[in-house]
Image (tube, grey):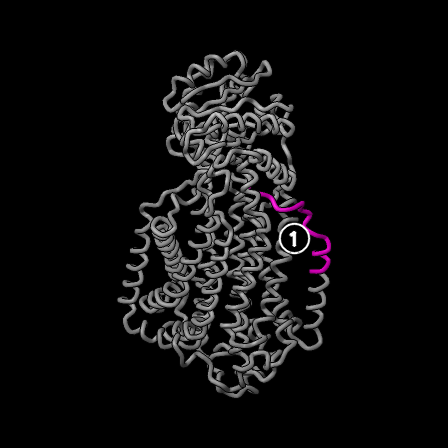
Amino acid sequence: MHAVTRFITSRRTSWIVLVVAGLLAGGIFALGSGSEGELSPGVGLPDSAESSRATALQETLDGADSTSALLVFSRDGDVLSDADLAAVVERSEELADLAAGGFVPPPTVSDDGTTALLALPLDVLEDAGEQAERADELREIANAGLPSGLEALLTGAEGFAVDIAAVFEGADFTLLLTTVIVVAVLLLVTYRSPWLWLVPLVVVGTADGLAGVVATRVSAIFGIVLDASVTGILSVLVFGAGTNYALLLIARYRDELRVFEDRREAMARALRGAGPAIIASGGTVVLSLLTLVFAELAGNRALGIACATGVVIAMIFATVVLPAALVQFGRGLFWPYIPRVGSEGSMNRGLWRGLGVRVARKPAVVATIGVLLLGALALGGTQLRVGLAQTEQFTTVPEAVVGQEIIADAFSAGSGSPVVVIAEADAAERVAEITEETDGVESVTLGETDGEITQLSVVLDAAAETPESFATVEALRAAFADLVGTSVDGDAIDDAVALVGGLDAQALDVSDAQQRDQALVIPLILGLVFLVLVILLRALVAPVLLLATVVASFFASLGASWLLFDSLFGFPAVDTNVVLFSFLFLVALGVDYNIFLVTRAREEAFAHGTREGMTRALAATGGVITSAGILLAAVFAVLGVLPLITLTQIGIIVCIGVLLDTLLVRTVIVPALAFLTGERFWWPGRAISAELKVVPSSATTRIGGDPRGAAAD
């Protein structure tokens, strides 16, 4: 360890670190990610899911290479005139040139006469840019020459695909620019120096850029393509975690500069003190993220692999590149608050030491109040609703959603997204009869067949992706399961008689898979975090208490966030993946702050005992933990700049959770629990106050002592 820190910080070799890092970064940037551009989030279901099997069979039919767009003509709820309907027919003729096969079916008019619907068959386009250009052309032709007040909206599969792609168009740049601005401002406020903030910002920014390239390459090895939602979260996480690590290292470096005249010696000591905590906390985040490789949904696996790669890069830059960069500058880098040798640090004075002293006086009262506060916030989550429909995914309402709502009001609620049933051709008539007899089904239409399988289009009474539509899908699946054994040729669809697919079935399968992923991944995360804490602290009591505070903080943030979502933002529910992702980030990152605080407390306790050691640790790390927490919370809140509710919800939950962690849990509740348990906090290890009392840390009891003596040991 000493040889490594010397190489990174010494006058003769620190520049080599920067040159090598620069060359490697330049080579990786030149190589590129290999990605063809931004992608919209996919479904990510495994091939074994019933809706996936139905889609695979549907793609074998003649019409598999086509999609559809729905053009909705209306005049704000008024009945359409004959002139309006004539204009719609004229538009259908104009649109025939863009339609697959050159034919557009006649328009369908709602029973109340307020809405006309054109179902436009289209060839499938893989390129998102070409798809957007075609959508613009469809809108232009559909609205050209319409009578005053009559409007055409694009919706359906094509409309939603284009609108979702538009949400993520330029998402990486928007998130990056906003994140950089937020981080720069907060670093400037934290350091109160006109130039110190530039060093960590440049280092972490470079790490963020590399993370995007490397994560894309690593994911490709596992056959996973990263979409824009994953790369957005990756960027936020790398910036947040990397800046947190930078804050911890620079805070320790500042302390050591008060002891050592030689800034390189001070950095070497700081790196030996803060480095293990950074590696332990970052390693915990990486291991927690890698639990997602066991998930069913491809999107969860993609997030785990990409973000784990990003955090590894953030750790390397924080512990190797940043120290080498900082020692190139003198103490003047901290101007106007330059740490001088022999000056008093925060260990024996200041807000955080005062807070620690006050908590130590009545730890039971403080712990009780803190726990009750977390419990009260957690109660807000008792009414939590999970599951957003496709029309509820956006914070701003796009055209496709407006069109879908008009269809739901004028036609059967499920007509805009019919359920697809793939049945054996010989059993298709019987399947259609069973479908018509199922509660919640509006109509059934026999579609394409290849002699082995037949596609049925089923319109439901309920709107898409609602509990009622899910119940109907489950009823259909149960009814078709009873037909097994009566099949003429079950091999056609894997020994089943009929499979249920389509948007509703797909959403139901995603929800079920997400529940299974949560049931698997959450215990794995808790187990890994507990194991890391046990190994790091060589104790059992402290890890149990620390893990309990992290979990309590998560439930409190979830409850508080739901109150905001329900009462202030008007969100109908949280998306299916929000709970898992929020839990992952809050537990993993919350443990970061536990590790920062408690490893310092253990270090101080060797010389001063647990009670004084925790007080001194709080004094030393309270400011940096608070600064890091506020910065991380602000960075995650940046996810709200995109008009996608899922990312907004994750950002808000993590933001609130991190603030609770840094302002309440880590600075008040954890010290109170340590004061209550005393030396038992480190059980079953030996009481720390009995160990190595004469070997203090370099930046604690040496403050104000002889720096020459300190440097000599």
**Which x, y percent locates residue 24?**
71, 60
Counting every numbered tag in the picture gives 1
Q: Quadrant of the N terminus?
A: bottom right
Establish if 80 lies above or below 524: above
Closer to us: 314 or 101? 101
Going 47% across and 47% down the picture, which residue do you hit?
Answer: 396
Closer to us: 388 or 234? 388
Establish if 160 lies above or below 183: above
**Which x, y percent locates residue 553?**
38, 57
Left or right placement of residue 380 versus residue 157 in this view: left
Left or right placement of residue 290 versus residue 391 in this view: right
Closer to us: 680 or 472? 472
According to the image, label 1 marks what residue? 213
Residue 48: in sight, yes or no?
no
Q: Which residues are magenta?
A: 25-41
Going 58% across and 68% down the picture, which residue do you hit?
Answer: 200
**Which x, y percent locates residue 157?**
54, 33
Label 1: state its secondary structure.
Answer: helix
Going 58% across and 35% down the picture, which residue do you hit?
Answer: 144
Instruction: Give the crowd class for mark 1: few <14, some 14-19, many >=20 residues within 10 Å.
Output: many
Establish if 619 lies above or below 63: below
Quadrant assignment, res 366: bottom left
Q: Amino acid at mark 1?
A: Val
Residue 638: in sight, yes or no?
yes
**Residue 36 lies in the magenta-colored region:** yes
Establish if 326 lies above or below 237: below
**Residue 6 lies in the magenta-colored region:** no
**Which x, y percent locates residue 374?**
32, 58
Q: Quadrant of the C terminus?
A: bottom right
